[in-house]
Amino acid sequence: MDLALLDATLSEMGQPPFRARQVWAWAARGASGYDEMTDLPLDLRATLEERVPFSTLAPVHEAVATDGTVKVLFHTHDGRPVEAVLMRYRDGRRSVCVSSQSGCPLTCTFCATGAMRFGRNLTASEILDQVLHFRRVDDVNHLVFMGMGEPLMNVDAVLAAAVRLPDAGISHRRTGVSTVGWIPGIERLAQSPLPLRLALSLHAADETLRSEIMPVNDRYPLPDVLAACKRFYERKRRQVFVEYVMLAGVNDRYEQAVALAKVLDPRVYKVNLIPYNPTDAPYAGSSRAAIDAFKAALEEHGLTATVRLTRGQDIAAACGQLAAQPTS
């Protein structure tokens, strides 16, 4: 819900400040509407139903993958498309992947969102409503700002939303923020008191290649980005996760693994290798053998490396596939 509108409405009605806290507590616990808020007077519930929409987002399409992953396409009040994903794991994790923008102004060539028309930044309430949608159907406990958009271009709204996540069952230490290397946002995140995790979308250690597949590298070159990440680590004492999508014949050779290991301090970084999820981009994913060899090369040079478990690929809900296109 629009929390600013909620506060303003309650204030206008002369309601005490604790009423807003009551409403939020119910929403964060998974209430599906004002009618469930039994500690609010009936006439107040009726007024809020009329004046403060229970969600800032309207779900317009839902798809469920064979692995249990759920993707929902929402529209904002002004018709902007937004997608969010719920990933269920056998170990009990229920992780929500949320969007921070409608579309993305950056044009990473392997990412379907980057091919969309950029709409606008989302508000903190629009980010939270993605979480609350899934909270109404499952007990969520992890979150990544890794859906549509560059979260650190919208850092104020991201941090404002993150502050409230523990109320919905997601601790700050189980919340991750992914960035392509937006340095002002990395610095702001480092200054925040919240112990959020930082993930860097890197994908190539070679400057020329990285600029080809991630044009943002021309604005914020990799050495400057890594310096900002190191400052984050020194302040937070939390390792930075490096995301590296594996593109066949592009960035998956042994010498490229060695080059990556040379620029990453193993005290600061862990590497997460991401099998490429098909989009309309002219790439093919690396073979499992190539991914394993790349991982072994990194480990030979002292880096910790893992391979991401792909979820929701059959409904275009996997990493890099969000493009606001309804899938069955």
Image: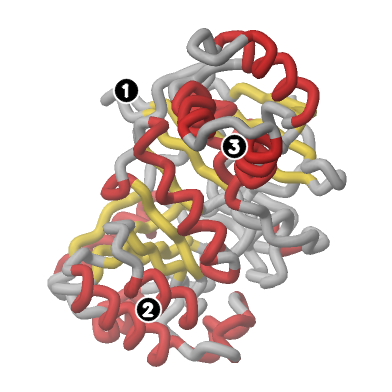
Mark 3 to mark 1 CA distance (whole Å): 22 Å
Q: Residue furthest front?
A: 14
Task: Tell me: 175 left or right of 14.
Answer: left
* Percent x, y of residue 64: 61, 22
Q: Which mark is residue 129?
A: none
In the picture, measured across the screen, residue 277 lies left or right of residue 46, that is left
Q: Which is nearer the eye, 156 or 183?
A: 156
The number of discs equals 3
Give residue 70's quadrant in the image. top right
Residue 295, compared with residue 316, is above or below; it is: below
Mark 2 or mark 1, earlier in chain: 1
**Horizontal side of residue 44 vs 304, given as left or right:** right
Q: Is residue 69 visible?
A: no
User: Which class describes the residues within 10 Å of circle 1: few (<14), some (14-19), or many (20+)?
Assistant: few
Q: Secondary structure at mark 3?
A: helix
Query: Which residue was labeled with disc 3?
Result: 130
Q: Earlier in the sequence, mark 2 or mark 3?
A: 3
* Local SS, label 1: loop
Q: Position of residue 15 (x, y in %)?
A: 59, 31
Label 3 with label 1: CB-CB less than 8 Å: no
Position of residue 236 measured from the top left corner of the image (x, y, whole percent): 22, 69
Residue found at x 48% / y 75%: 185
Q: Amino acid at mark 3?
A: Gln
Element assignment for label 2: helix
Q: Which residue is mark 1?
A: 90
Tell me the CA gap for discs 2 and 3. 38 Å
- Which tag, 3 or 1, sits closer to the chain's start? 1
